[in-house]
Image (spheres, helix red, strand yellow):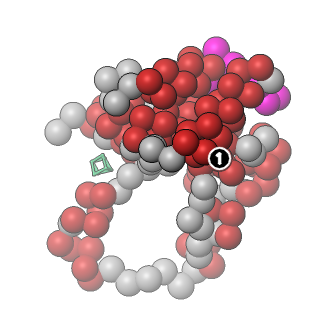
Amino acid sequence: MDARRCISYLTIEQGGPIPLELRPLMGNRIYGCDDCQLICPWNKFARRAVLPDFDVRPALANPDLLQLWSWDEATFLRLTEGSPIRRIGFSSWQRNIAVAMGNALRAERDAATRQALRGALSNWLSQPPAGVDVPLVGEHVQWALAQAGAS
Ligand code: SF4
């Protein structure tokens, strides 16, 4: 196994750009993957954690990509406080969501949803949020917009 192709590695550990050839394979995973944890037979013995730290957070339960994309850095820091998600920082967070939005644009058939995705990405380019690595995330936003015409 090549760990550099693991979605958890790409979305959490790797800084900088995500390799172009791997982006379409990431689907809508914006932080980790852990499908291997679902498949692992030993995990059938796992028990639900009782510590509140492991509870689902309302802001991250069944999240909508557009909603997550609308967070500014202060919102990201506030809503991920005490969570390992916070460790990747706002720029990697936005980088990952941009890839997921591009993949959604390629697969989405609903015109209104496509328009909403395109609009949110274009707005980012005209007014990037404060605190973000504009060259890094901007390149992923451009890639995401280009997926609108790919299929
Ligand atoms: S299934 Fe496991 S190894 Fe494969 S991409 Fe997901 S987290 Fe990585």
Whether residue 10 is visible here, answered yes or no, is no
In the figure, residue 19 lies in which quadrant?
top left
Measured from the top left, where is residue 105 in percent x and y? 48, 36
Taking the image as shown, residue 27 lies to the left or right of residue 75, namely left
In the figure, residue 39 lies in which quadrant?
bottom left
Measured from the top left, where is residue 2 in percent x and y? 21, 34
Write the residue at 65% across / 47% down. 66
Task: Name the kind of residue labelled 1 in the image.
Answer: Leu
Quarter occupied by the C terminus: top left
Is residue 115 depicted above or below 62 in this figure? above
Based on the picture, tell me whether residue 3 belongs to the magenta stretch: no
Taking the image as shown, residue 94 lies to the left or right of residue 150, namely right
Write the residue at 68% across / 32% down. 119
Residue segment shown in magenta: 128-137
Whether residue 54 is visible here, answered yes or no, is yes
Quarter occupied by the N terminus: top left
SS for dot 1: helix
Write down the residue under mark 1: 66
Which residue is more in the foreground, 96 or 69?
A: 69
**Residue at far top of view:** 135
Measured from the top left, where is residue 86 in percent x and y? 65, 48
